[in-house]
Image: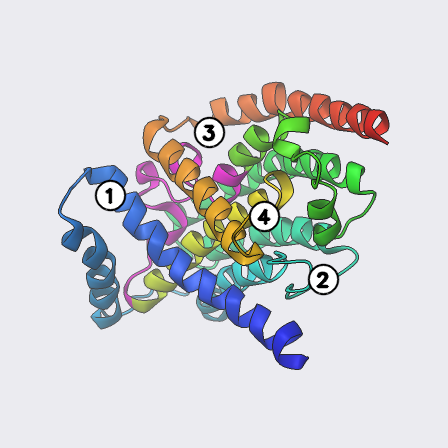
Amino acid sequence: MILDQLILPWLLAWLMAGLGAYLVAVLDRWMATGSTQAGSVWLAPLASAAWLLTQQATTTEAPDAGAWRLAPALYLALAATGLALVPWSPTLVGVDLATSLVLWGSLEALATVVIFLHGWSANSHLALIGAYRYVALGISYLLVSMFVLIGVALPAESLRWTEVVAAQESLWHVVSQPLGLPLFLVVGLGLTFWGPLDLADSTDLSTGTAVERSGPPRLVWALARAAMLVAFSAIAATAFLGGWMGPWLPGPAWLLLKSLAVLVVLLWLGRRLPRLAPERCLTLMWVVLLPLSFVDLIWAGAVALWMA
């Protein structure tokens, strides 16, 4: 009982975080280069990781050393906790709380704190600009995410992820709430500062909050960012694509396939869409996406009443 309901789901969460981060590096490199040399695509992330592990970790003048060391590990822990919330089947869930959907929302808010801590604690002006830039944008991501997640909770009449999946037995939310998944994907790119919404660690800030990072801490930060993208993909598959539901294959296999599909879409969008300027991103979030999230919530409530 302890093995099935506690140890195995947590092992799956950490395994998915590690392997998922590696897969993110492979897919992102393949999409960037379009290389058909499979060997280099699969081995390059491992070579980069090995090189970072052998490098010396540099430091800045008078950083907040404790917070600076802790931030990458905290971000990785948030990603693993998010994966632990994902139900692999009706019974295989790491953390099956009655308020697990709210816990995911709190992880998104805590991620904002950790990212700010990562940039602020370095005592470097470019890292600090990246941190403040993320905080300035983060609240708009959180509001859009909150309204979209309330929309998926309405049909289930529950804040438990397993109930949200069960409510999609007759119709997945990607169909009944057509605005939900596109909005959630944009939120995912923003909260993981990936692709067009990579404004905290962007190239115009020389990698922003990570500008002073080198060696193993930089590797942990990159691993944590990729793991958070994987966690977001798994949550999106749970919220909108029916989670473990599907014919023939076991539930965990369906969840993996659906999460992989969302991950590929996020990485593809990250490579194909141009990076937005911070002020345009802010306008997009407050003027376009936030009103659309209101519409999505009203639509979700109307559909839930109609199907009740």
Residue 305 has which mark?
A: none
The amino acid on which the numbered mark 1 sits, given as a three-letter code, is Trp
Q: Is residue 129 visible?
A: no
The amino acid on which the numbered mark 2 sits, given as a three-letter code, is Asp
Cα distance in 3D space between marks 4 and 2: 14 Å
The amino acid on which the numbered mark 4 sits, given as a three-letter code, is Ile
Which picture quadrant has residue 93?
A: bottom right
Q: State yes or no: discs 4 and 2 in contact (Cβ < 8 Å).
A: no
Cα distance in 3D space between marks 3 and 1: 28 Å
Residue most extreme to the front: 248
The residue wearing badge 4 is 235
Cα distance in 3D space between marks 2 and 3: 37 Å
Q: Which residues are magenta?
A: 188-215
Horizontally, is 273 left or right of 84 in the view?
left
Residue 234: x, y in percent?
54, 49
Q: Residues within 10 Å of mark 1 (few under 14, many from 20)?
A: some
Q: Secondary structure at mark 2?
A: loop
Lower sequence index among marks 1 and 4: 1
Image quadrant holding the C terminus, namely top right
Q: Secondary structure at mark 3?
A: helix
The residue wearing badge 1 is 30
Q: Is residue 52 above or below residue 165?
A: below
Residue 34: x, y in percent?
20, 37
Residue 123: x, y in percent?
42, 57
The residue wearing badge 3 is 278
Lower sequence index among marks 4 and 3: 4
Lower sequence index among marks 3 and 1: 1
